Image: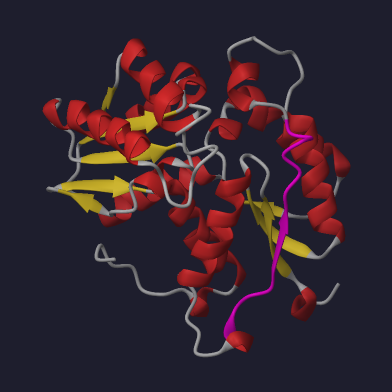
């Protein structure tokens, strides 16, 4: 495959709306004046094959979604991807990520896989240098896995999260409620789901956070703002989109602004 044939790849089934959202954000963050200026992008979405990440982390199922993610990576490589993003925070838990990365290493294939969590922390350091206290909103699986607090603490940040009952409420009502959750109704996000997300923001605001990581890729669908009051809202999916453009063709990346 020549450099001219290379493409950006998206593992898009974890979950389906997150994959579409990442593809749209790649478009929005690309410098372009006409169709031909946009970057070649592959999206593979096999949500029926990728097991529920949270249920796996909670021990409710034993099938590791890492194996399905690895198969998507292989398919993207075959189709010409040179750099790939996985727009799922929970899939970056070590119990999942370490497995598909090891399988990829053993395959001997060449593909740059962007780590969305590391990119988010790097973005925070580069664009919010005054921030010392960071909150995290996420799925209950990401909350229990604890990788955001661990990595943020290692980078010198004070961490604030919801308590388990508050986090479970956000998970159940804003994300997974079968009638009004973002997983089933994302365009537009329901008022009930957004209300629960704003309640979570309010709890963290009272704890003195200066920035909040929206640590489930569907949460920014309900909270598209980049700032609320004086609090920065960090969207890992948006940060991943920018990282993919940076790695693929940096001259096409739009300058960053906190204004939408």
Q: Is residue 156 visible?
A: no
State the image coordinates of residue 152 (x, y, percent, origin top left).
36, 32
Q: Is residue 154 visible?
A: yes
Q: Quadrant of the N terminus?
A: bottom right
User: How many numbered marks, from 0 up?
Assistant: 0
Q: Identify the residue shown where x is 61% and y is 51%.
A: 19
Left or right of residue 200: residue 36: right
Q: Nearer the viewer, residue 221 or 111?
A: 221
| Residue occupying the far front of the picture | 179
State the image coordinates of residue 210 (x, y, percent, origin top left).
18, 40
Q: Identify the residue shown where x is 47% and y is 52%.
A: 187
The vertical placement of 135 against 235, above or below, is above
Q: Quadrant of the C terminus?
A: bottom left
Q: Main secondary structure of the magenta part?
A: loop
- Figure coloring: secondary structure
Range covered by the magenta-colored residues:
37-50
State the image coordinates of residue 133 (x, y, percent, origin top left).
20, 33
Taking the magenta stretch, the answer to whether it contains residue 110 is no
The vertical placement of 146 against 29, above or below, is above
Q: Nearer the viewer, residue 211 or 15?
A: 15
Q: Nearer the viewer, residue 110 or 141?
A: 141
Left or right of residue 255: residue 15: right
Q: Nearer the viewer, residue 98 or 69?
A: 69
Report which quarter residue 2 is drawn in: bottom right
Q: Identify the residue shown where x is 46% and y is 27%.
A: 139
Q: Identify the residue shown where x is 47% and y is 74%.
A: 253
State the image coordinates of residue 108 (x, y, percent, origin top left).
86, 46
């Amino acid at each position: 495959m020549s450099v001219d044939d290379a493409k950006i790849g998206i593992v898009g089934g974890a979950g389906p709306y997150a994959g579409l959202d990442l593809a749209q954000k790649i478009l929005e963050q690309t410098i372009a004046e006409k169709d031909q200026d946009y970057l070649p992008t592959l999206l593979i979405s096999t949500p029926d094959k990728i097991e529920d990440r949270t249920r796996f982390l909670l021990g409710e199922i034993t099938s590791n979604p890492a194996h399905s993610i690895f198969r998507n990576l292989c398919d993207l490589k075959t189709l010409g991807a040179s750099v790939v993003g996985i727009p799922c925070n929970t899939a970056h838990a070590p119990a999942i990520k370490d497995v598909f990365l090891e399988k990829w290493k053993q395959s001997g294939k060449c593909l740059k896989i962007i780590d969305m969590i590391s990119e988010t922390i790097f973005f925070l350091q580069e664009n919010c240098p005054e921030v010392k206290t960071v909150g995290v909103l996420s799925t209950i699986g990401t909350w229990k896995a604890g990788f955001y607090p661990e990595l943020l603490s290692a980078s010198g940040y004070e961490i604030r999260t919801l308590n388990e009952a508050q986090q479970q409420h956000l998970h159940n009502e804003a994300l997974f409620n079968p009638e009004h959750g973002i997983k089933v109704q994302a365009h537009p996000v329901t008022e009930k789901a957004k209300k629960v997300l704003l309640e979570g923001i309010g709890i963290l605001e009272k704890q003195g956070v200066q920035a909040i990581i929206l640590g489930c890729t569907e949460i920014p669908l309900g909270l598209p703002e980049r700032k609320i009051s004086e609090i920065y809202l960090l969207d890992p999916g948006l940060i991943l989109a920018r990282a993919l453009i940076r790695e693929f063709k940096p001259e096409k990346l739009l300058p960053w602004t906190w204004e939408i």
